[in-house]
Amino acid sequence: MSTGILTLHLLLPGCASLKEKRSRLKPLLARLHREFNISVAEVDHQDHWQDAVIACALISNDHAFTQRALSQVLHFVETSWPDMTLIDQQVEII
């Protein structure tokens, strides 16, 4: 069994309220869940308007599949969400 966690620190420039931040993050979280069948949630900086840390979790029976899938998630976020800037990313596979 392989468990993978991808943590993404995102910058959301131009957000002027927590409501606006949620309205920009919610479609991303829903799309990641739908497209990649992963668990995803905002895990840090919930009270900062222009920062967000999201975590994506995946469990599979193949270490290589977990690595590939999380790499695809990272690529998808970088290319499909140009209004968000990726500041940092971290992958942990157990």
Image (spheres, rainbow, N blue to C red):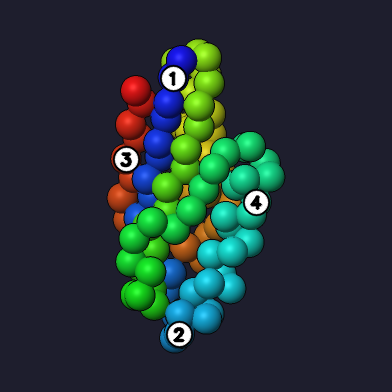
- Where, by quadrant of the figure, is residue 26 drawn? bottom right
How far is the residue under mark 2 from the one under mark 1? 38 Å
- Where, by quadrant of the figure, is residue 5 drawn? top left
Q: Amino acid at mark 3?
A: Gln
**Residue under circle 4?**
31
- Where, by quadrant of the figure, is residue 81 drawn? bottom right
Residue furthest toward the front? 1
Quadrant in which the C terminus appears: top left
Q: Is any part of residue 17 visible from this angle? A: yes
Q: Earlier in the sequence, mark 1 or mark 4?
A: 1
- Residue 22, how many percent across, how many down? 53, 72
* Local secondary structure at mark 1: strand
**Residue under circle 1?**
2
**Residue under circle 2?**
17
**Residue under circle 3?**
90
Query: Decide: marks 2, 4 in contact (CB < 8 A)?
Result: no
> Considering only vertical position in the picture, is 83 above or below 88?
below
How far is the residue under mark 3 from the one under mark 4? 20 Å
Q: Would residue 94 be found to the left or right of residue 70 on screen?
A: left
Of marks 1 and 3, the one in the foreground: 1
* Local secondary structure at mark 4: helix
Query: Decide: marks 2, 1 in contact (CB < 8 A)?
Result: no
* Local secondary structure at mark 2: loop
Q: Earlier in the sequence, mark 2 or mark 4?
A: 2
